[in-house]
Every structure is written in structure tokens, then in C-alpha cells.
């Protein structure tokens, strides 16, 4: 009888390929399959010598090569592709087999899939895998859900290939059905917040202290020796000291400052809203990414007033009135943007000015200034944000020094004023010339090969960070 594989991997993108190599390097015979066989062939040619790989061209061949109970890992893009692969494989499996989803699936999808497969006697194990491509190869952190029974046979293999700290594997049974993917989702939400905070720290050092990226890299290296020591701080230092070969400029300056996201941060916030958990830092980080991508609003808001540096010359009550007014304009601007986006998404063709008109009386948020909103949309029905309407821009511009002062007073006095502070950050985010979203894009490219766009050329790029002397690669060419 032909040799049987202990485990299999289908989907040989960067993560799948590296995970398969990790199994093989740990001495497990591993079956490998990809929808298009070129990737399987490439894996065998480049890395076949690393261990016991059993290549398969068809799902049938792949399943037949697995020892029972079969254990197969699906490493495809989360969403519809995962369902398609499950539909393809489920009829080929038998009760007791273990189907493992190693992608960043939504935990609700994992719960649904687990239940459907449980009814057929198949164990469905949703596994969160973190560590990017390098982690998948050299030892990731692994968060498996599913049945305890499945973990009994699968767990030791996963623990074997996981990262180890002080000899302890970074893998443990998390809980039933969607628990593993839920924990991975929250991991990513924290990742978003961590990256946003680092980006803000960089931006402050650059803009408020005038430090160059290379100097900030040194600061981060020093911090990495202390209590902030972490992978993200370490790679941030590497990113900040990297020089773009084409232009000789600091790399961070040629990256387009529009941060992208695949959705796990957003899911974390959505789940937290449902659970009633105030994850404000994660939400701000998620919204900061989304703000950075609103090119239309940012373009229109670029000329809005910034701090004048002058004294206030008014009472504190007057300053609070101004902060209240400016923050209120931000709230309405955000709400109307949401209606605009909902209308476009669902094809409702909502007249924004008319909504302002019917809110002028009767409703709870009725207010004098809804008339002004109506007028703003009359003047420009497609205005990207109310903040750039001439009258609101002038008023908020006049109020913003006082607004800043109130936010500082609140901060200094230990009085929580998240509404004022967050609205002000939104205003400043929109009017910023450059956002540290560029650093977030560079970090994403560093740890996950997520690619970035440049300020000076069209296209999608990836830097081969581990090989500093290689030119930047254009991935869409
Ligand atoms: C990890 C990462 C990984 C991926 C993120 C990126 O833990 O290894 O989190 O899962 O890089 O999904 O997410 P965004 O594309 O949303 O930034």
C-alpha cells in the first residue's frame, strides 16, 4: 500500500505552503493539494527535499492519501471559497474524519459549518493561526476550536508545529465550534489597536518633535529593549530604517497612506457591539484605517483650519460651547455620511437634504442647525462631508482652538471626554496631509505580504523584507 499522510493541506498559497512545510519539517508525512496543480508542483520542486510530501492532483487522490481518521487543513481565502472547498470534500470524508479550517473565518460561519458537518459525523475544527508567512513556517500561535475529541488526535500535531516559549507550545484547545476563530478575531482586533497606537507614536515623534524616520527607528529599537518589547515594535524599527531603493527616500514616505483591512478588526468591533463590550481603542483603530481610505473626504478637507497657536481670550464655558458645537457638527457629518453610504449600497436614492428637513421638528435630535444641513446639501448634494461646507468649515475653524483647549483640559483633569476627543481626532484625521496609515501598510506588508501602493507610481507592490538587497517587486505586473 502506498504511503499514507498523517495530515493534508489543500490550498497552497503562501500560508498553506508554509504550514505544509512546517508539518513536513516536523517529520509528518503531509499530503498537499491545490486547485491549480502548478502550486503543488512548485512546492515539490522548491521544497520537496524538506520532508515527506505526498502531492495530489485531485481531491479524490488527496483524500485517498490520508491515514484514518483523516485530518485535512483547508487554507483558502475565508468566505465563499471555504464553503466551496467544504462542499467538495465533505462527500469524500467519513464519520470521524477531521476537517480543519485554518483561514481567518468569521466565528459565526465556523459555528454554522461545525453544526452542519457534525450532523454528518465529521469534526469541523476552526483554527486561528497567527504569525504571518514566517510564523506558519517556523512556528505560529495556534487557536483551535471544535470538539475536544477532535483535539485529542489533532492537538499533539498542532502543538508540535506551534511556536514554543519557555518550552510551552503556543497552542491549546480553545473551546467548542467557533471559539478558536473568535479568539483569533479578537487577536486581530488587538493587532489593529496595537498597530494604530504605534503609528500614532511615530506620527507624534515625527510631526511634534521633528524626528526623522531613521531616528524614530532608533527610539523604537531602544523601546524594544524595555517593557514595550514586541514583534510589532521590532518590525516598526525595521520599516522605519528602510530606505526606498528607487527614490532614496525613507520607505515610509513613499507608501500611500491609505490603510487596508480584510475585515477581522471590523468583526471584532461588530461582535463587541452585539456583546455590549466597550472596545473603544479597537474601534478607533478600525475607523482610523477606514478614514485613511476616504480619499474624497480627505481631499476636500485638506484646507480646513488647523491650530492657530493663539490664546483663547474667552471663558471656559465659552470654550466648552465651541467644543460642543464643533463635535456636534462632526457627529451629524458622520451620520449623514452613513446614510449616504447605506443609500449607495442598497440603491435607496435617499435625499439627504430632505432628511435634514424632516428632522427639523418633532424628532429627538431636532435642532436649529438642521436647516443649515439642508442648505448645505442644497448647495452641493454630493458634498463628501458636511465639514467642508463653507459655513460649517468656517464655524468649526473658528471653534477648533477652543475645542483643542477643552480636550487638553479634560485630559489633564482626568475627566473622560471621549466624544470631544474622538471627534477632534476625526477632524484632524480628515484634514491631515499625510497619515501614519502609511506605516500600517508597511507593517502589513512586512508581516503578511499584504502589499502596498506607492505615492509616486501606480500599481501594487511588495517588498521582500528578508532580502533587503532585492528591488521592490511589483505584484500586479
Ligand atoms: C496574523 C495576522 C494575519 C493577517 C491579518 C491582517 O495573526 O498572522 O493577523 O491573520 O495578517 O489578517 O489583517 P488585515 O489585512 O485586516 O490588516
Image (cartoon, rainbow, N blue to C red):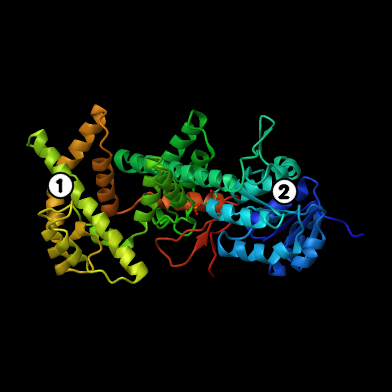
State how many labels appear. 2
Marks 2 and 1 sit apart, C-alpha to C-alpha, by: 57 Å
Q: Depth check: give the residue in front, 39 or 243.
A: 39
Q: Is residue 11 visible?
A: yes
* Residue 193 appears left or right of 462: left
Q: Position of residue 404 (x, y in %)?
A: 20, 40
Q: Is residue 229 above or below residue 27?
A: above
* Residue 1 appears left or right of 222: right
Q: Identify the residue at image location x=44%, y=56%.
A: 260
Q: Depth check: give the residue in front, 303 or 58.
A: 58
* The quadrant where residue 321 appears: top left
SS for dot 2? helix
Query: Which quadrant of the figure contains the N terminus?
Result: bottom right
Q: Residues within 10 Å of mark 2 (few under 14, many from 20)?
A: many
Residue that carries the numbered disc 2 in the rendered image: 22
Disc 2 + disc 1, Cβ < 8 Å? no
- Mark 2 Cβ and ligand 1 under 8 Å apart: no
Q: Position of residue 52 (x, y in %)?
A: 82, 53
SS for dot 1? helix
| 2 or 1: tag closer to the N-terminus | 2
Q: Is residue 306 visible?
A: no
* The quadrant where residue 171 appears: top right
Name the outermost residue toward the right: 1
Residue that carries the numbered disc 1 in the rendered image: 325
Amino acid at each position: 500500500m502506498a504511503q499514507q499522510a498523517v495530515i493534508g493541506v489543500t490550498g497552497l498559497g503562501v500560508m498553506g505552503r508554509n504550514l505544509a512545510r512546517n508539518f513536513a519539517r516536523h517529520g509528518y508525512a503531509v499530503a498537499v493539494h491545490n486547485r491549480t496543480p502548478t502550486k503543488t508542483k512548485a512546492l515539490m520542486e522548491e521544497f520537496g527535499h524538506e520532508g515527506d510530501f505526498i502531492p495530489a492532483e485531485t481531491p479524490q487522490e488527496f483524500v485517498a492519501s490520508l491515514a484514518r481518521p483523516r485530518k485535512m487543513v483547508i487554507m483558502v481565502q475565508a468566505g465563499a471559497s471555504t464553503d466551496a472547498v467544504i462542499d467538495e470534500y465533505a462527500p469524500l470524508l467519513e464519520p470521524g474524519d477531521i476537517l480543519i479550517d485554518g483561514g481567518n473565518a468569521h466565528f459565526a460561519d465556523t459555528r454554522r459549518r461545525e453544526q452542519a458537518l457534525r450532523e454528518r459525523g465529521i469534526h469541523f475544527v476552526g483554527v486561528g493561526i497567527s504569525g504571518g508567512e514566517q510564523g506558519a513556517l517556523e512556528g505560529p500561535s495556534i487557536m483551535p476550536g471544535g470538539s475536544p475529541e477532535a483535539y485529542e488526535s489533532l492537538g499533539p500535531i498542532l502543538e508540535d508545529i506551534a511556536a514554543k516559549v519557555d518550552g510551552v507550545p503556543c497552542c491549546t484547545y480553545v473551546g467548542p465550534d467557533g471559539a478558536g476563530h473568535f479568539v483569533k478575531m479578537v487577536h486581530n482586533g488587538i493587532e489593529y489597536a496595537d498597530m494604530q497606537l504605534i503609528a500614532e507614536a511615530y506620527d507624534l515623534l515625527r510631526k511634534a518633535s521633528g524626528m526623522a524616520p531613521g531616528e524614530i527607528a532608533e527610539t523604537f529599537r531602544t523601546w524594544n529593549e524595555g517593557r514595550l518589547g514586541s514583534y510589532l515594535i521590532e518590525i516598526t524599527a525595521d520599516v522605519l530604517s528602510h530606505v526606498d531603493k528607487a527614490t532614496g527616500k525613507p520607505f515610509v514616505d513613499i507608501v500611500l497612506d491609505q490603510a487596508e483591512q480584510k475585515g477581522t478588526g471590523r468583526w471584532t468591533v461588530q461582535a463587541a457591539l452585539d456583546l455590549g463590550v466597550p472596545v473603544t481603542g479597537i474601534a478607533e483603530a478600525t475607523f482610523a484605517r477606514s478614514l485613511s481610505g476616504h480619499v474624497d473626504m480627505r481631499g476636500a478637507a485638506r484646507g480646513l483650519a488647523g491650530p492657530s497657536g493663539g490664546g483663547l481670550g474667552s471663558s471656559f464655558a465659552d470654550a466648552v460651547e465651541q467644543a460642543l458645537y464643533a463635535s456636534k457638527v462632526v457627529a451629524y457629518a458622520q451620520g449623514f455620511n452613513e446614510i449616504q453610504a447605506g443609500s449607495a449600497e442598497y440603491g435607496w436614492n435617499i435625499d439627504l437634504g430632505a432628511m435634514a428637513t424632516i428632522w427639523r421638528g418633532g424628532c429627538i435630535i431636532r435642532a436649529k442647525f438642521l436647516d443649515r444641513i439642508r442648505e448645505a446639501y442644497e448647495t452641493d448634494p454630493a458634498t463628501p462631508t458636511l465639514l467642508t461646507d463653507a459655513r460649517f468649515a468656517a464655524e468649526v475653524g473658528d471653534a477648533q482652538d477652543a475645542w483643542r483647549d477643552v480636550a487638553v483640559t479634560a485630559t489633564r483633569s482626568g475627566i473622560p471626554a471621549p466624544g470631544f476627543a474622538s471627534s477632534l481626532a476625526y477632524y484632524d484625521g480628515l484634514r491631515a496631509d499625510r497619515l501614519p496609515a502609511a506605516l500600517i501598510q508597511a507593517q502589513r506588508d512586512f508581516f503578511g505580504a499584504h502589499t502596498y501602493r506607492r505615492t509616486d507610481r501606480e500599481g501594487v507592490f511588495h517588498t521582500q523584507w528578508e532580502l533587503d538587497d532585492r528591488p521592490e517587486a511589483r505584484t500586479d505586473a
